[in-house]
Image: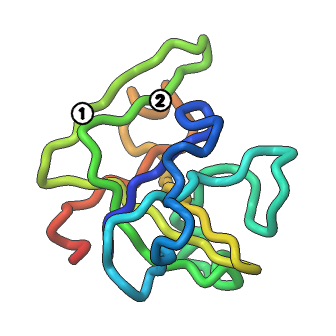
Amino acid sequence: MRRVSIQTRRQDPQGLLSEPAGSPACTPEIWRPCVLTWGRREGESGALPVGGWARHESVLAGKWDRFFPKPVRLDIEAFMEKDNQGKSHWYPLTASNAIQALVARMDGEQRVYVVTITPTLPDQAAIHSRWPRIVPASSLG
């Protein structure tokens, strides 16, 4: 599994983090760090699913197969979830852990989607109905 960096439209509305023209394509077959857009916003054109998440059970059931998913890991220091009242909650990750994600591809478009699970702990479930799948970084190659 390779590492990717992700960007969101809020972080990069002008596309400044996009790879320069003429740079090699960000391909799952060749490992190298690259920048990909996280998911697809509602109203944004494209062939890939709207949203930024792929439920783990959907991936296992083959529902993402038509998008030629390639597993990737997101090496991050922390992630944030907002509760029902809009309050932000930050969750740090250790260097030995990563968030599992996938790169979906269709019609020349590719985007990264965070793989999610149903929260297993009561405090997680109180924050959100989906939770990033945290895996040992060493298990991802």
Residue 109 position in % (x across, y down): 69, 71
- The image quadrant that residue 31 belongs to is bottom left
45 up-or-down from 33: above or below? above
- The quadrant of the image that shows the C terminus is bottom left
Label 2 packing within 10 angstroms: few (<14), some (14-19), many (20+): some
Residue that label 1 marks: 92
Residue 32 position in % (x across, y down): 32, 73
Marks 1/2: CA distance?
12 Å
| For marks 1 and 2 on the same chain, the one whose residue lies earlier in the sequence | 2
27 up-or-down from 115: above or below? below
Residue that label 2 marks: 81
Instruction: Choose between 14 and 49: the one closer to the eye.
Output: 14
Instruction: Choose between 135 and 22: the one closer to the eye.
Output: 22
- The image quadrant that residue 133 belongs to is bottom left
Which amino acid type is shown beneath numbered disc 2?
Glu
Instruction: Choose between 64 and 119: the one closer to the eye.
Output: 64
